[in-house]
Amino acid sequence: MIITNELEPLSTDLTKITTEIKTYQSIGGQAIFEIGRRLNWVKQNNLTHGEFGKWLSSIKLDQRSAEMFMKIDSQLSNSNTYSNLGYQALYLIATLPSEERDKPQQLNSGETKKPDEMTVRELREVKKKLKQREQELADRDETIANQQAELEDNRKAQLEQKVITKTVTKEVPVKPDDYEEIKAKIAELKEQSAKDKENIEYYKRELKAAERINKNANSYDKLQEQELKRKKRQAEINGYNASLKINDWIPELQKLSQEDVDEMGEQAQKNLQKRLELLQRSIDRLSSMLGGRRIIEGEYQS
């Protein structure tokens, strides 16, 4: 069968499409695009009458793989650029931002490669870096927006605090009979005013000191909050890194058969047994910390 880049109309006969998908499953390579195209066609036209999942099981295709094929078909063009890549690499490229799919990226090793030249491990590394950069930009934009909002609030508060005072002076044309009494009262009030002014200055100083203490406390609380966010983000990164490494180990362990074990030398068997015991202890420890939760078979997160 010859695979071309020309998109011919697909049949609405589910039996025919099922046969075509099984044929492409046996071919591999560019057939990934053809499988994804047909899966999208079946789902968009509801050819399975609401039983898409059951139909996938009938052609021995799990939900996770089907979603990956459909994503590859909808996001990437069926070109010779991707003809030698497996479905995992194609899926990682398809889930990169569109503007990054053809752009050379610098790896931790110092090499610079385009996504279609990378291994699955390198694509995961690049995807992780892009996510971190996206988060940093989002945090920066949020900080700028908060600062602008704070400046606007301060400006409005300053405008509201402005008070216009008008003084009205009334002339007294005749010296009243109680002039001396009033004069003495004024002197008394001035003396009291001086004491009040001294008290006001004292409380102003106390208020400023309290404001400085409160500001320092708020700064310390913000630093604690930022540190907690940083620790949480680092913990999540460590968790994802561990998950990715486990995904890399599993295929290697599954490749070992009873025949392989029987053909090993005694020292090789001992070494393998020792590592498996260490791995089991690590699994038990992490499972205990996770509260006994298990990842459901077939569940997938990009």
Image (tube, rainbow, N blue to C red):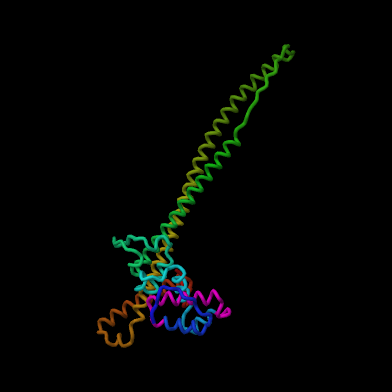
Is residue 294 visible in this depiction of the protein? Answer: no
| Name of the residue lying farthest toward the right | 177
| Name of the residue lying farthest toward the top | 174
Residue 41 higher or lower than 152, as above or below: below
At x 50% / y 43%, what residue is drawn? 215
Q: Is residue 206 left or right of residue 32?
A: right
Q: Is residue 182 left or right of residue 20?
A: right
Q: Quadrant of the C terminus?
A: bottom left
Q: Is residue 179 left or right of residue 298?
A: right
Residue sitting nearer the eye, 122 or 253? 122
How far across and down, in percent of the image, does residue 203 sit? Answer: 56, 34
Q: Quadrant of the N terminus?
A: bottom left
Q: Main secondary structure of the magenta part?
A: helix
How far across and down, in percent of the image, does residue 113 sit? Answer: 32, 63
Count of all numbered marks drawn on residues in the image: 0
Q: Is residue 63 left or right of residue 104?
A: right
How far across and down, in percent of the image, does residue 288 sit? Answer: 45, 72
Is residue 200 visible in this depiction of the protein? Answer: yes
How far across and down, in percent of the image, does residue 176 sit? Answer: 73, 13
Asked whether residue 95 is drawn in magenta, I would say no
At x 73% / y 15%, what residue is drawn? 178
Residue 236 location, quadrant: bottom left
Residue 83 higher or lower than 101, as above or below: below
Asked whether residue 30 is drawn in magenta, I would say yes
Q: Which residues are magenta?
A: 25-51
Residue sitting nearer the eye, 99 or 127? 99
Residue 121 location, quadrant: bottom left
Residue sitting nearer the eye, 73 or 279? 73
